[in-house]
Amino acid sequence: MPVIVETVSAPSAQDRSDLEKIYADAPDWLLPPFADAGELIGQGIARGQLLAGRFNDRLLGAALLEKGEDHWRLSHLCVRKVTRQRGVGRRLVDEATRLAREAGKPLRLAAPRDHLETQALAARLHLPLDPL
């Protein structure tokens, strides 16, 4: 069964619990400018920017997708530790890329410029890095 990517707009109680678990596994540098995971999730839902990957009715990964005038930005990408290295993050990136391409916009990965892990991820994904 494939990972289904969706924009989270009306999360169930289980979805909220899954999102909290996803961002509980996030490194501290991933959350700013949000005060905590709850704020990131709440604002992402309110703004219609929270993209999530679902498998077997559970959310396993999430990211924010900001739709700007000149380009779209994918940020705050996080996958639960127990599910990493299984293609969930890649599926989120691929779907964000597809949506941006359909809108005629380039996609950029938003992350701290000095963070080597995100620089490597951006290079692997062939996405320009948009510093936070």
Image (cartoon, grey):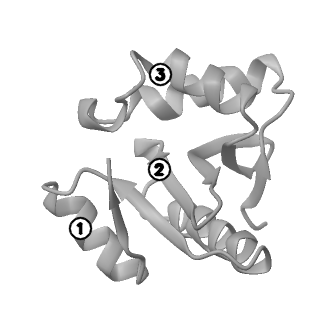
Label 1 element class:
helix
Q: Closer to the N terminus: mark 2 or mark 1?
A: 2
Is 77 situated left or right of 122 in this image?
right
Residue type (three-letter) at the residue carrying disc 3 = Ala
Q: Nearer the viewer, residue 93 or 49?
A: 49
Q: Are marks 3 and 2 in contact (CB under 8 Å)?
A: no
> The disc labelled 2 sits on which kind of residue?
Ser
What crowding class fits label 2: few (fewer than 14 Cα within 10 Å), some (14-19), or many (20 or more)? Answer: many
Q: Is residue 12 above or below residue 62?
A: above
Task: Give coordinates of residue 89: x percent, y percent.
Answer: 52, 61
Tell me which residue sits at (81%, 26%) in the image: 11
| Image mark for residue 19 | none
Dot 1: within a 10 Å radius of its alpha carbon, few (fewer than 14), some, or many (20 or more) residues? some
x and y, in percent, of residue 99 in the image? 74, 70
N-term mark: 1 or 3: 3
Spot the residue most to the front: 69
How far, Cα to Cα, is label 1 from label 3?
23 Å
Q: Which residue occupies 67% across, 47% down?
A: 52
**Residue behind mark 3:** 37
> What amino acid is found at the position of numbered circle 1 in the picture?
Gln
> Label 1: which residue?
119
Q: Which residue is mark 2?
A: 75
Comes first in the chain, label 3 or label 2: 3
Residue 96: x and y, percent?
A: 65, 66
Of residues 96 and 73, which is closer to you in this image? 73
Disc 2 element: strand
Residue at image location 61% in from the left, 51% down from the top: 65
Task: Verify CB contact (< 8 Å) between mark 2 and mark 1.
Answer: no
Q: Residue at x 37, y 30 (%)?
A: 31
